[in-house]
Image: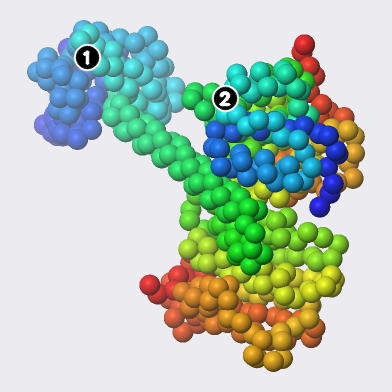
Amino acid sequence: MAAPVPSYSEQAALSLAMAVVASSPGPLLLLDGDLNIVAASASFAEAFDIDPASVAGRPLAALGAGEWAAPQLQALLDATASGAPTIEAYEMDLKRRGRKTRRLIIHAQRLVYLDLGNPRLLMAVTDVTDSRASAKAKDETLRQNLVLLQEVRHRVANSLQIIASVLLQNAKKTQSDETRGHLKDAHNRVMSVAELERQLTGSGDGHLDVGVYFTNLCASIEASMIRDHDLISLDATGAGGVVPVRVSTSLGLIVTELVINAVKHAFPEGRHGKIVVDFALHGPNWVLSVTDDGVGMPTDTAHIRVGLGTSIVQALAKQLDATVETEPGHPGTRVAIIHTQIALVDEDTVDDADAPAVALPAA
Amino acid sequence: MNAPTPGKTLLIVEDEILPAMALQAELEDAGYHVMDLTGLHQEALAAARERKPDLALVNIRLQGRDDGIALAVDLKAMGIPVLFISGQVSRARTAQTVAIGSLPKPYDAADMVAAVDYLLARLTGDESLPRPFHLEVFLPVTGSLLPDAAE
């Protein structure tokens, strides 16, 4: 018996369906239950270099030079046409002679419509070859950058080691106690930056946990400056906090200067005592203090000499928009570097939990 | 500062002469005998054969194409314990089966003396010294620090 002639409205619906498939911007095929092509989008013909006029009515497996005849794809499509679940993302390599292999992702689903006796499959093809290659290239660039960063940090560490070694050698050779003291101070300053570099090796985002940094820095200073650990102790306290590297560099140098000063002057003639480095962060404001329980500052101001260390502390504090306050510690001395920035805080910065806890001072 | 065991001999293998010299001076001041400095694999091996050091301080980057990890493998085979003194921290960690510790650059010379004191004490079973802050000790189980000589 001849198939019934479709009515005008049926023809219109069929033509609409064909037009929708043909105009799809992404490669799209409409297949029948035997995997013959009912319609193909122009984008499919263009993407896979197939003559659009020769497509309709041909089996999918006969397209091109047979490159779509992959047995696993055919089996999956057959199963879907028979009622198996939708093929969500089947990956396959499309191999064509004389061309580069393309990596494709196939999505295919059986259409639900009125004519249950004539199953139809809609097969969408996404070519991910270029995007995958681009992502791979990006990953490779990132990996190379990390290798480069490690190499730069390694070189910086090496250079700091050389500088510190030269200063130490000079300090050992010099006859003058005063010069030796200056050279050792310079050595400690270099090691303060070196400690920061060591810390940065484990951090890639330009921020640093001051608490950890100060703990390590104090351990370094203690090892190099304090000969008798039973006499003088040096500890870092406070919850710390994350600050930009620029800020932490200055903070580390300030700590180094203040600790050098305390070790040199607070405990004369074998006096016992302790030095405590504390950092308290409150939003954008912070207080860094170095407290000792030594002999305290000389009461006679004529005996107070402004040395290089004091100048460095003042200059760095100014750079950080902070003030330096020195007060008696009963016993000893407390030097506090206070940064108050409430009036300058940008609201977005405060609200953003990922933002650095300390804002950079205005340049 | 802890007094080192008298008479202990150290080998420093480092491609950068200035840090090597500073290290040598600091360790000698602390009472150690430091062998002639070298930055070459074969030269270091020859020196180690002539006078077996108690500990070798080895940088990972050496002169020319020489590599400190390869040297550490050879030194371990001779029964000589190795301390890595390189800024290449991750490479040192991957080679921890051939070394007993790592004190990465940039290190303080005083820290290095403390690290050597500590490791030499551990090698003789003395665990009384505190571990220097930056020293990473590999194979920390008591008695396992001495490498097995293959020879």
Using the image, determine if residue A108 lies above or below residue B116. Answer: above
The residue to which callout 2 is attached is B40
- Visible in this render: residue A244? no
The residue to which callout 1 is attached is A99
Depth check: A106 or A333 in front? A333
What chain is tagged by disc 1?
A
> For residue A213, which quarter of the picture?
bottom right
Whole-percent x and y of residue A112? 34, 31
SS category of the residue bearing label 2 = loop
Residue at horizontal 78 percent and vertical 81 percent from the top: A295
Residue at horizontal 56 percent and vertical 50 percent from the top: A166
SS category of the residue bearing label 1 = loop
The answer for how far apart the CA atoms under marks 1 and 2 are is 52 Å
Q: Residues within 10 Å of mark 1 (few under 14, many from 20)?
A: few
Direction front: furthest residue:
A175
Horizontal placement of A331 versus B63: left or right?
right
Quadrant where the image shows the C terminus of chain A: bottom left
Q: Tell me the kind of residue under disc 2.
A: Leu
Q: Tell me the kind of residue under disc 1.
A: Arg
- Visible in this render: residue A346? yes
> For residue A41, which quarter of the picture?
top left
Q: Residues within 10 Å of mark 2 (few under 14, many from 20)?
A: many
Residue at horizontal 73 percent and vertical 33 percent from the top: B10
Depth check: A170 or A307 in front? A170
What chain is tagged by disc 2?
B
Whole-percent x and y of residue A310? 57, 77
Whole-percent x and y of residue A292? 75, 75
